[in-house]
Image (tube, helix red, strand yellow):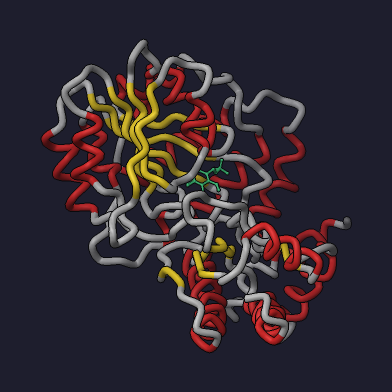
Amino acid sequence: MERRDFLQAGLAFGAAAGIGAGVSLVPEMARAAVRRSGGPLRLNSNENPLGLPQAARRAILDGLAEANRYPRESRIELVGALAALHRVEPENIVLGNGSTEVLQMSVQALAQENARLVLADPTFEDVPWYGQPFPYRLEKVPLDGRHAHDIGRMKERAEGGGRAIVYICNPNNPTGTVTPSSEVDEWIESADENTYFLVDEAYYEYCVDPGYWSCTKWVTKPNVIVARTFSKIYGMAGMRLGYAVAHKEAAARLSEYIAKTNANHLVLVAARVCLDDAELVPASLEANSRAMRILYDVLEELDLEYLPSQANFVMHRINSDLATYGRRMLESGVRVGRPFPPMLGYNRLSIGLPEEMERFAEILREFRKKGWT
Ligand SMILES: Cc1ncc(COP(=O)(O)O)c(C=O)c1O
């Protein structure tokens, strides 16, 4: 792809939000980006449908000149910028090859005979996955009636028996629901030093619930690790970058398990410029909420219950067998989310561009006509 095409395709970021100088041209570019991607609509992995931001594209092209060098300066610079963003020291930041590597490092660094891994059910699966090679005892606690983490029951399972690692995914994947931050704070404040909190804030930027705030404020405690990512709101899932914000002691512990140059130069420079782009997060949010409204409307029209979401995906009822539903969706040109037991009566649908959600809505109406949902 020519430099100009690569940059222009970047204008797709912001298209659905209707922002940017060439507004009239932009929707066509977004449509072109959808057409180019070919294959089924990808409403399965909670990616950002706006594509890689234009500022990131420019930084990547400029960064190619240094791609033959180990990424020393660009790493220092991004870590410094993240530290400034979170009002912490660079020693409080640990970069990951995606935030999934932060989860992996945490699980590895904290593993111990008879340690418990306490998590919600259902929640994002990476933490128990990374825990498998270690002698963790898995303690799954069903979400409560609000689809929030049941902090009371999680506490019972975590406390009073040696080390526990508590994974809190907030907002939670796959439900898109929030656990009130006051409840999380209260537990962190009162917990003993054997209780470690791994707080996954992959969808932090999407959340507008006034009862939600970040756990990065707990960086003062050596038993709290917060994971963040550039994969979602910043549209960089394929570039792979996440990070931990943690107490220096915890950060040093995680770093014992890091692959030292785990973030490549191009993603580092791309992330750096994204942090300075004031339009980027609002554009993503605007597009996400417009597209989500289209989804909510069709779900309400068809009387399919859904969980109001604080992220870029929605869990909704399907009134049929999930495997059959997923197969039929794929045959109709849509890739939908994987199963999240025990919520097998629901599909997790990622939010695409508004026009992609219109397409999904049409297909869902067809499903209803055929009695498939
Ligand atoms: C809750 C949660 N945490 C972490 C990740 C991993 O993201 P990444 O490794 O791309 O930062 C995801 C990806 O979907 C997620 O949903």
Outermost residue to the right? 1
Q: The C terminus is located in which quarter?
A: bottom right
| Count of picture labels | 0
Q: Position of residue 275 (x, y in %)?
A: 49, 52
Residue at horizontal 65 percent and vertical 63 percent from the top = 43
Residue at horizontal 42 percent and vertical 67 percent from the top = 309
Residue at horizontal 66 percent and vertical 49 percent from the top = 59
Q: Position of residue 92 (x, y in %)?
A: 35, 30
Q: Nearer the viewer, residue 261 or 111?
A: 111
Question: From what the image shows, is residue 254 above or below residue 36?
Answer: above
Question: From what the image shows, is residue 204 above or below residue 244?
Answer: below
Instruction: Name which quarter of the figure residue 49 lies in.
Output: bottom right
Q: Position of residue 279 (x, y in %)?
A: 50, 67
Residue at horizontal 76 percent and vertical 27 percent from the top = 68
Outermost residue to the top? 113
Q: Position of residue 215 (x, y in %)?
A: 28, 44
Q: Is residue 94 left or right of residue 266?
A: left
Q: Is residue 11 left or right of residue 2?
A: left
Q: Is residue 151 left or right of residue 86?
A: left
